[in-house]
Image (cartoon, rainbow, N blue to C red):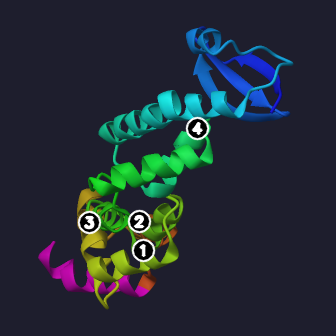
Amino acid sequence: MIITKIEPLTSKKCRIELDGETSFALYKGEVSRFHLKEGEELTEEQQKKIKNEILRKRAKLRAMHLLTLSDRTEGELRNRLKKDLYPEEVIEEAITYVKKFGYIDDERYALHFIEVRKESKSRREILMLLRQKNLSAEKIEWAMEQSYGETGGDQEAILKILQKKRFFENIEDPVKVQKIYGYLARKGFRYEDIRQVVQNNIGNA
């Protein structure tokens, strides 16, 4: 393969382009070490050395570092490693490596994600957020069922929001009541659930 471009990414790192396509990133010292130059061929032996001696180890360390900063789904981690210009084969190895130690578990992630939000967000809101996390539909459905069971599970969250907004102190003010109803509806709570919570708690105000 021909090295068509060696382009600086940072003051220390370069993007290596092979046959017109981005392939990987190396530090400038590594570019010199492997004698890489634009217009010259990157031999198969050089490619193997770069993957085996640098990229495989670095991708695993990068994956571990990213997971210590924040819990991530497999899809999020995969996308981040792609953004860091690791080749697909290297990314797969890094994903397998962290999975082996239990550092990524999409089902556990989804379940925890729901549990820490279900008291302040509607089921619909949480569902939308989970879909942005590159989780499979099956894993999302499983986690929602585990967390909510067969019920909607939103009434506790609705009550907490009403209490936080001092709804029951303003129950006689139709404008404020309507405003809070609208707020809850926009967050994805069902009107029937809102009405039920209000009815069940209005005497406790």
Horizontal side of residue 11 vs 19, given as left or right? left
Discs 1/2, front: 1
Earlier in the chain: of badge 1 and badge 3, it is: 3
Q: Residues within 10 Å of mark 4 (few under 14, many from 20)?
A: many
Tag on residue 139?
1
Q: Earlier in the sequence, mark 3 or mark 2?
A: 3
Q: Which of the two discs, 4 and 1, sits closer to the camera?
A: 4
Amino acid of disc 1? Lys
Looking at the image, residue 158 sits to the left or right of residue 19; the answer is: left
Of circles 4 and 2, the one toward us is 4
The C terminus, quarter of image: bottom left
Q: How far apart are marks 4 and 2 (CA)?
A: 48 Å
Whichever of labels 3 and 4 marks the residue nearer the N terminus, that label is 4
Mark identifier at residue 26: none
Q: How crowded is mark 1: few (under 14 residues within 10 Å), some or many (20 or more)?
A: some
Contact between marks 1 and 3 (CB within 8 A): the answer is: no
- According to the picture, the residue beneath numbered tag 2 turns out to be 180
Mark closer to the observer (1, 3): 1
Kindly identify the amino acid type of the residue bearing the numbered disc 3: Glu
Give the labeled residue for mark 3. 115
What SS does tag 2 mark? helix
Q: Inspect the image, locate mark 4, and give the three-letter code of the amino acid beneath it.
A: Tyr
From the viewer's side, name the closer residue of 82 and 110. 82
Point out which mark residue 86 bears. 4
Query: What type of secondary structure mainly makes up the magenta span?
Result: helix
Please tell me whether mark 1 sits on a helix, a strand or a loop: helix
- First to last magenta residue range: 192-205
Say whether residue 170 is visible: no
